[in-house]
Amino acid sequence: MKLFPIKENYLFQKAYKNGTRATSRALSVYVMRDRNAVLIKKANPQGDYLNRIGISASKKIGGAVQRNRAKRVVREAYRQIGKERTLKKGYLVVIALRVPATVLKMQEVKRDLHYCLKRCGMYLEETAASENKGVTTDNEA
RNA sequence: AUAGCGGGUGGGACUGCCGCGUGCCGAGGCGCCGAAAGGUAUCGGUAUGAGGAAAGUCCGGGCAUCACAGGGCAGGAUAACGGAUAACGUCCGCCGGAGGAGACUCCCGGGAAAGUGCAACAGAAAUAGCCUACCUAAGACGAAUACAGAAACCGUAUUCGGACGGUACAGAUGGAAAGGCGAGGUAAAAGCUCACCGGCACGGCAGGUAACUGCGUGCAAAUGUAAACCCUAUCCGAUGCAACACCGUAUGCAGAGCAUUGUUUGCCCGACAUUCUGCAGGUGGCUAUAAGGCUUCAUGGUAACAUGAGUCACAGAUAGAUGGCAGUCACGCGAAAGCGUACAGAACCCGGCUUACAAACCCGCUAAAAGC
RNA sequence: GCGGAAGUACUCAAGAGGCCGAAGAGGCGCCCCUGCUAAGGGUGUAGGUCGGGUUAACCGGCGCGAGAGUUCAAAUCUCUCCUUCCGCG
């Protein structure tokens, strides 16, 4: 599967402000419903809804090499999760990296990402009820 | 052998599975664009895919747009000399100076006799000859004595005095006191004179393309600072791929607002659109360029480098492609298990500089002291 | 990617070659005021660190982001790095 990137800055801002948030040691995940999902579905030859992914690595976590590697690792982890489980489609997913992401191995990052996505209720098999649950747990946190 | 100096190489290797960018080839039913041809998303195959610093953005050039008759001012940069180069503040050679026992290293290395400024504290004095000290030879002044005369003044002679005279640095300083040191010289002194050393000048000679060096002759004038202003010589139009060209001006996003109109259930609230303000997107440029790399190539040159031949030329993304996992080997640390393998990521392209850098390896050169 | 500023005590900062042994303010300490505190008033020291010295007075060295250089002398001038901030879009 291909990843569709977020590049507009305002979408990042919106996700930080309004999205459902879940944080682990290596990364934070912000999820919100994609308003333009229909357009993207139209552009997609498979005719499916797609998630748009934005990975944010600030200068705080290291130089260009560290940031690039961390982004690659996160992309790989997301790809594997997407293959193993069925994710809900038509969402904006922003993944903000934290310092440990530069050192961790891929499996550890994947575990973190899996945990965060679960908290945000992104897995299809857990149905709509878990979305509310995800939100409430987030509020509790 | 040891210690050291200089230069260079190098930037872990391989296998399997999954995944990404780009070029080319093929497919492209369904989807999208198109009247169609076709194109495209996509799929398959194949090739290929970060650096020596890609970094800092400190210089120089290409390229692009704008400006431009020519010249000057202002502003900026550079600074011994000769060469290399597209060009440079780079490189090579060489001169001078400084350091080292030596190999060798370092130097923003023009002008302070064009002018202005600054030089704290200390010190007698800071660019100028005040004060203390030294001297009393000549001249002047004062005093005393002697001579002549009755006596005084005047005059002459001798002695003494001090500076209004001479000398120019002895005076605890200071980064710097207007050559050093020794001898002569003198009333006391002083390049005043001489020897040696040092400095400066020369349209003198020799060597060198030149900076300069050696010799010769002459001179005694000249504190430091130009990374203070400044002067001299040389160079520089400005802005940068976010340049620039083309296609779109549809629509999207953000904010304001509920005045108008419409939709949402007849009304109210609310929401959305209409309204106002602000901001944009895509394609090309974009990489086969050559001033490029390689050859223990040839020729010329001390060298930088130039010329010629052969050969290789294979990133081109657009929020940014090289990754993940597993295994084997290599190297380092460790008794082992194991851990680690630097600095670091192209963004229009080249030539340099500067800075960062793990392990390993190669070449040339030096030899004072100590040890064998 | 391109361009431009600034780094001085715990904090805000002045100083722009020598009088710097580095102003000033906040903060800090002590005293007064109050039953106690806050506010207010008065007053004071060290100002960082290393070494010497009697746990003292005091003395000396190095300290103005770091390292070189120019100068007799550098917080100040020059160069190279580091960090922080800002502008262009």
Image: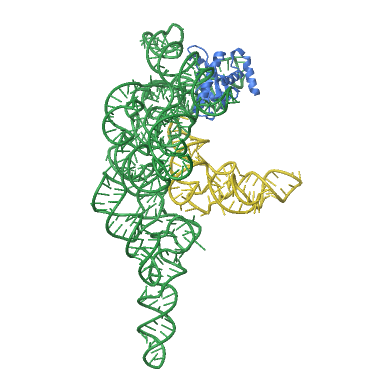
Chain colours: A blue, B green, C yellow
Tell me the quarter of the picture where residue B335 sits.
top right
Residue C81 percent coordinates (x, y): 47, 37
Tell me the quarter of the picture where residue A134 sits.
top right
When the figure is inspected, residue B67 is found, relative to residue A115, above or below; the finding is: below
In the rendered image, the quadrant that contains the C terminus of chain A is top right
Residue B63 percent coordinates (x, y): 34, 29
- Along the viewing direction, whichever of A22 and B343 lies nearer the viewer: B343
- Along the viewing direction, whichever of A122 and B248 lies nearer the viewer: A122
When the figure is inspected, residue C83 is found, relative to residue B233, above or below; the finding is: above
Q: Residue at x 64, y 18 (%)?
A: A133
- Along the viewing direction, whichever of B42 and B248 lies nearer the viewer: B42
Residue B123 percent coordinates (x, y): 48, 62
Asked if residue B290 lies left or right of residue A26, the reply is: left
Q: Can residue A106 be spotted in the picture?
A: yes
Asked if residue B263 lies left or right of residue C88, the reply is: right
Residue B21 percent coordinates (x, y): 44, 19
Q: Residue at x 57, y 25 (%)?
A: A16
Q: Can residue A34 be spotted in the picture?
A: no
